Image (tube, rainbow, N blue to C red):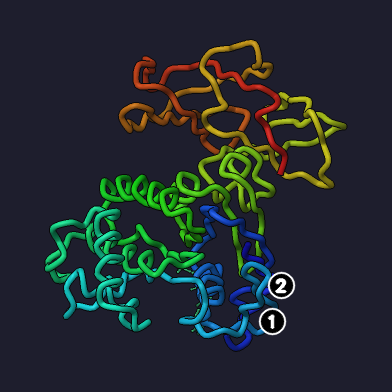
Amino acid sequence: MIEVKSITKKFGNLFAVKDFSIGINHGEFFALLGPSGCGKTTLLRVISGFELADGGNIFLDKENITNLKPFVRPTNLMFQSYALFPHYNVFKNIAYGLEREKLEKQEISIRVNEIICKTNLTGLEERYPDQLSGGQKQRVALARCLVKKPKVLLLDEPLTALDKNLKEKMKIELKNLQKQFGITFIIVTHDQDEALALADRVAVMNEGQLVQVGTPKEIYSKPKNLFVAEFIGKMNFFQKLKIEGNNFYFQDNSFITLLENNFENPQCVGIRPEDILLKANGNTNYKFEGKIIDIIYHGQENEVIINSKISEEPILIKCHKNQELILNTNISLYCALSSFRLY
Ligand code: ATP
């Protein structure tokens, strides 16, 4: 539905976005994820028309919209700050875009009331933005975009202004609203958990370029390179002592036989904390010894830091709250060869 083709945007000599191409499907919840300054917002602003590209094209349903003004594009951008009008009440804020389109008063009223109901704002119509909570303000900003029935809604860090609990609640609401309206959502975020929880597909960006695109599961379980592996979730990296054939030697001279070795000069292997187990099972075929040096309580699932001769860096594992672990004791740990990835 949306085709971003070789988009480049420069500010002076800086490439904010460089030769970026992506296809986004109709009705998809798509996330642009990357560290601060990697060009996510710039790309979103180019798609919305608030910024003009220096090169490349954007097609929406095969129509070239690259040079269209923002307000004539079938897209709508929800700003990070929400940008509500402080002197308008909730109803007027939501109605604003329709009034600009010079629609009949009655139609405006029907559409605004319908969206107020769907976004759970009933009873707040007369309130002004400074009389609303963070979550309510966010819903008004969403309602104001959705009421215009855009084909694509672009959201710049929509949850950043909310506290942790509200963020969790709004994640669910955002996902429900997207399903209910069937509109394509493109969200910009630097928060990995947010992108993985919300999106059907995630594009990971770095220094203006696309690094990897895939479903949250693909990105998490098969990060393409060291950058994605470090950026998404937590990962233990073990530096190599040496590699001989398909054997990867850890710092203590123990080794694993890698299932595949397609890399020219791999530096390390990576393994997710949850793939290092405290008990052997049918899949685990590598065992190493370690000592518990710290336990970080998170409630349901805790993090345990281990020192081991296989690595100079401490190793992170995860364990359930019911698992009894004692500080400064030695333990055995088990991994499946298939859990290791080479970088
Ligand atoms: P953040 O997550 O911090 O918002 P981002 O990934 O959205 O970052 P952008 O805001 O797109 O990144 O910025 C990309 C790069 O372009 C940055 O180096 C930024 O300083 C630069 N940049 C953005 N807008 C402008 C501008 N109007 N003029 C000059 N440089 C800019």
Mark pair 1, 2: CA separation:
7 Å
Residue at 36%, 45% (x, y): give it: 172
Instruction: Please name the residue that numbered disc 2 is placed on.
Output: 6
How many labels sit on residues?
2
Residue 278 image offset from top left, x and y in percent? 51, 17
Kind of residue at badge 1: Gly
Residue at 66%, 40% (x, y): give it: 222
Residue 293 image offset from top left, x and y in percent? 42, 28
The answer to which image quadrant residue 126 occupies is bottom left
Circles 1 and 2: CB atoms closer than 8 Å: yes
Q: Residues within 10 Å of mark 2 (few under 14, many from 20)?
A: some
- Residue 265 got which mark? none
Residue at 35%, 16% (x, y): give it: 322
Residue found at the very far right of the displayed protein? 245
The answer to which image quadrant residue 66 occupies is bottom right
Residue 319 shows up from this direction = yes
What is the quadrant of the N terminus in the image? bottom right
251 left or right, relative to 156:
right
Circle 2 SS class: strand
- Front position in the image: 72 or 229: 72
Residue at 66%, 22% (x, y): give it: 336
- Front position in the image: 183 or 19: 183
Kind of residue at badge 2: Ser
Instruction: Please name the residue that numbered disc 1 is placed on.
Output: 55
Circle 1 SS class: strand
- Front position in the image: 270 or 222: 222
Residue 113 image offset from top left, x and y in percent? 24, 62
Of mark 1 and mark 2, the one earlier in the sequence is 2
